[in-house]
Amino acid sequence: MENASGGAGFLTIAVVVIALVLPGLVLLEMWRSRRVALADDAPDTVLDPVLSGAGMSRKILLVMVVLIEAMLLFLAYGANEPFRQASARERQKEFAIEAGAHTYVQYCVSCHGVSGKGYLENIGLVGKPVNTSALQATDPDERKVNAKMIYQTVQNGRNNGAMPAWGVENAGPLNYQMINELVLMITEGRWDAVESVAKSQGVQSPTEAPITDPVAAGKLIVTQGACASCHAVAGTAAKGAVGPALDGIAGRKIGGVADFTAANMKKWVANPSSLKPGSSMPGYALKESYLDAIAAYLATLK
């Protein structure tokens, strides 16, 4: 796009230069020709530059130049129009993202945090992580699915969770445009815009309280966090089917290779390949206190 835009810009400059220079050259030639004609005529001859043959020729030439000028300027405008439109769309998108960031800081930070990591950033936050690679999919179909899911969640809330309904249809403060701007910011992963707005307004994530109940904290992370997207735990919101169910995990080997201990479980969550090279499970760079909490909760699943 940048190369094409640069080419169109060069073409536009060239056309404008020609459009400016051409009339000057024509007028100069007309002036020179008229001076030659006047010099060659007898002193007592009265010339009508408009009605004479030379005058008519110059008039026709001038009209042609004006038409060529109009055509050149039209071509210059047309060459740049797609890029002007693309630039306008990009500016409009940036405005929408910034508006979405303002909405997020005003209504969402208290539960999801400035970084959008929710309780993975701060166990004291009740909101789920919304700053995830899954919600920032590049595939167009996945983006549509994500956008629809986020929109409906924001608009209508969740009956089984702490997420309230924010849409005006449900007596909330957000209209469809505000929700769409928020959805765009999240799916584009523009957390830099959120951080900028939060900084300008002096807004910070709530201070994290110390974990006093590791088992409860671990259950929250496992059954409502990233673990739940792949694993299931009976009687909880974790319904993942990609990996094995976690029920009874404390009574079996971790990854089929390591004894269940708190230390091994923490290693497994942080870097599965350290215990089982080539494991398909991704590692999670979590705080030490979160790893302790996960190990404590999983130890209860016997």
Image (cartoon, rainbow, N blue to C red):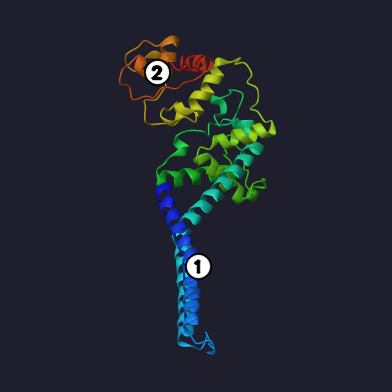
At 50% from the left and 43% from the top, the residue drawn is 149
What residue sits 47% from the left and 54% below the top?
83
Q: Position of residue 24 (x, y in %)?
A: 50, 67
Residue 232: image quadrant is top left
Circle 1 Cα neighbour tier, 10 Å, few/some/many (<14 / 14–19 / ≥20): few
- Direction from residue 131 to residue 107 in the image, left or right: right
Q: Nearer the viewer, mark 2 or mark 1?
A: 1
Q: Is residue 24 above or below residue 202?
A: below
Which quarter of the rendered picture does the C terminus lie within?
Answer: top left
Would you name the residue on which mark 2 appears? 271
- Could you say which is closer to the camera, residue 117 or residue 291? 117
The quarter holding residue 165 reads: top right
Disc ID at residue 10: none
State the residue in front, 166 or 19. Answer: 19
Residue furthest out toward the front: 43
Residue located farthest toward the right when viewing the structure as drawn:
202
Q: Which mark sits nearer the N-terminus, 2 or 1?
A: 1
Q: Secondary structure at mark 2?
A: loop
- Count the numbered circles shown: 2
Q: Picture coordinates of residue 237 (x, y %)?
A: 49, 31
Query: Which structural element holds mark 1?
Result: helix
Query: Where 255 sits versus 199, above or below?
Result: above
User: Type of residue at label 1?
Assistant: Gly
- 106 or 9: nearer the viewer: 9
| Rendered position, 269 above or below 29 | above
**CA separation, marks 2 and 1?**
74 Å
Which residue is drawn at the image coordinates 56% and 50% (left, top)? Answer: 92
Q: Where residue 24 is drawn, which disc sits there?
A: 1
Neighbor class of circle 2 (other Cα within 10 Å; few <14, some 14-19, many 20+) is some
Q: Is residue 71 visible?
A: yes
Amino acid at the residue labelled 2: Asn
